Image (tube, rainbow, N blue to C red):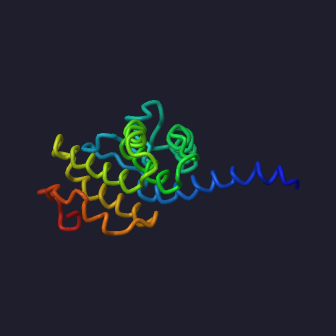
Amino acid sequence: TSTLHHHVTLPLQHMSNTFDQAIGPLLDAEGGYVNDPTDRGGETKWGISKRAYPQLNIAAITEDDARAIYRRDYWDRLGLDDVDPSAGRVLFNIAVNSGVGQAGRLQERYGDNPEALIEAQRAHYKRIVENDPSQIRFAKGWNARMDNLQAEIGLPSEIAKTRTDAIPQDPLATPEQA
């Protein structure tokens, strides 16, 4: 193999590995099939929502389908192969959880700063609950997602202290959900 060949293939392998490293934890966080009437995304599987993909049979989506959708419509659309890997992981999660538009706006404002991106997303979650109290049941999971992501990319835990703990507890939550 020529040196030129190595220079061409190594960045591509690195880029693919970055997506490959990000997709596993994301799919774990999103889980399987859910059809919760209070979820604004509606019917979802692997985090792919009927709201975002009304033409798809959500229940029939495979994990490989989800990976392809996430690569094409989220990772590649935001150009995440070209950003700092930690920021890319954060932006990818934001795009999946809150939309590519939200991730793009935060990317424009905060660039490749994963700490600022996480804090801005936490503030976004707080505003969602303030504007629509029915979404409070999702707040703990949203913040846990940011906590897990923060740990995955190696940010110090002190950052979590500024999280949106001001979101009140869901009065309808069972002790397991609280």
- In the image, is 22 to the left or to the right of 131? right
What residue occupies the far right of the structure in this picture? 1
What residue occupies the far top of the structure in this picture? 55
Q: Where is residue 158 drawn, in percent x and y? A: 30, 68
Q: Nearer the viewer, residue 43 or 156?
A: 156
Q: Is residue 114 above or below residue 154?
A: above
Image point 45% across, 41% down: which residue?
58
Q: Where is residue 97 drawn, in percent x and y? A: 38, 47
Q: Where is residue 85 drawn, in percent x and y? A: 53, 55
How many numbered markers are drawn?
0
| Quadrant showing the N terminus | bottom right
Q: Nearer the viewer, residue 143 or 58?
A: 143
Image point 41% across, 60% down: which residue?
149
Q: Nearer the viewer, residue 126 or 160?
A: 160
- In the image, is 107 to the left or to the right of 13? left
Image point 84% across, 54% down: which residue?
3
Q: Where is residue 122 drawn, in percent x and y? A: 28, 52
The quarter holding residue 79 reads: top right
Q: Is residue 133 above or below residue 55?
A: below
- In the image, is 3 to the left or to the right of 90? right
What residue occupies the far left of the structure in this picture? 171
| Quadrant showing the C terminus | bottom left
Image point 42% across, 47% down: which residue?
47
